Image: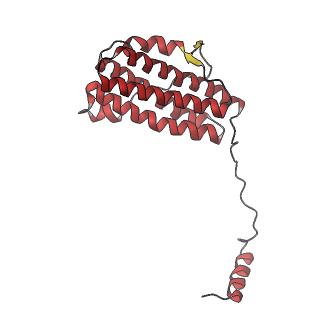
Amino acid sequence: MMGSAGVAGVGSVLLGRGVAGAAPASVDVPPSAPTPEDTDLLAAALGLELTAAQLYGLAVESIDDEFVRDLAANFGTYHEFYAEEIAGISGLSANYFDEVVYAELAPSFGTGDVEEFAAAAAQLEATASATHTQLVAEFASSSARTLSASIQVIEARMATVMNDLAGNGDDLDAMLTSDAEPLDLAAVPEGRDV
């Protein structure tokens, strides 16, 4: 056990070596709140999440299998929640979706065929995951990075579930890898209110 004289001695040694009382190295701390540039990207990410929610709603209306219908409803709810979280940190209204992505995927989500729906949903989730991965690197604020990273992890898992439902459960490459490209969210595309 070290007495107070021992602690003082250690302190004087550290002071003599420049450890105690030394100025900390300069560290760039990211802003906590989203920057204007972050908000532009968050607006596009918000549109992607609401689009996914709308697509899953279409699947719920067209699929007869109760388990798959419940799964689609749950996944749609997750995307609505992500949109609300994005709106919450950005101050944006959660009422926009991407018509281009919707038009491209709506036929597969509304087909009623489970495997076709699941394959399209797996691709949507992989694309959303890749998009959020890219956004983490592009955001300046810690709040936008943290939120996007948390969404990315879940959407990657959702892609795996949908790949299994699409009949790829025995193909580890299909289950665990993706060639999905992130969406270009540099500008909010034309869309409509939900």
Instruction: Give the side of residue 190 with respect to residue 10, left or right.
Output: left
Quadrant of the rendering where the N terminus is positioned: bottom right
Q: Quadrant of residue 135?
A: top right
Q: Quadrant of residue 82?
A: top right
Instruction: In this rendered view, identify the residue nearer to me: 66 or 101.
Output: 66
Which residue lies most toward the left here?
170
Quadrant of the rendering where the C terminus is positioned: top right
Decide if residue 180 is in sight here.
no
Instruction: Give the side of residue 74 with respect to residue 168, left or right.
Output: right
Tell me residue 110's x, y (percent): 38, 13
Q: Residue at x 69, y 47 (%)?
A: 29
Instruction: Give the side of residue 37 with respect to residue 103, left or right.
Output: right
- In the rendered view, tell whether residue 24 sits above or below residue 74: below
- In the rendered view, tell whether residue 182 sits above or below residue 7: above
Q: Residue at x 72, y 54 (%)?
A: 26
Q: Quadrant of residue 24?
A: bottom right
Q: Residue at x 43, y 23 (%)?
A: 124
Decide if residue 66 is in sight here.
yes
Which residue lies most toward the front here?
66
Q: Residue at x 34, y 12 (%)?
A: 111
Tell me residue 72's x, y (percent): 39, 25
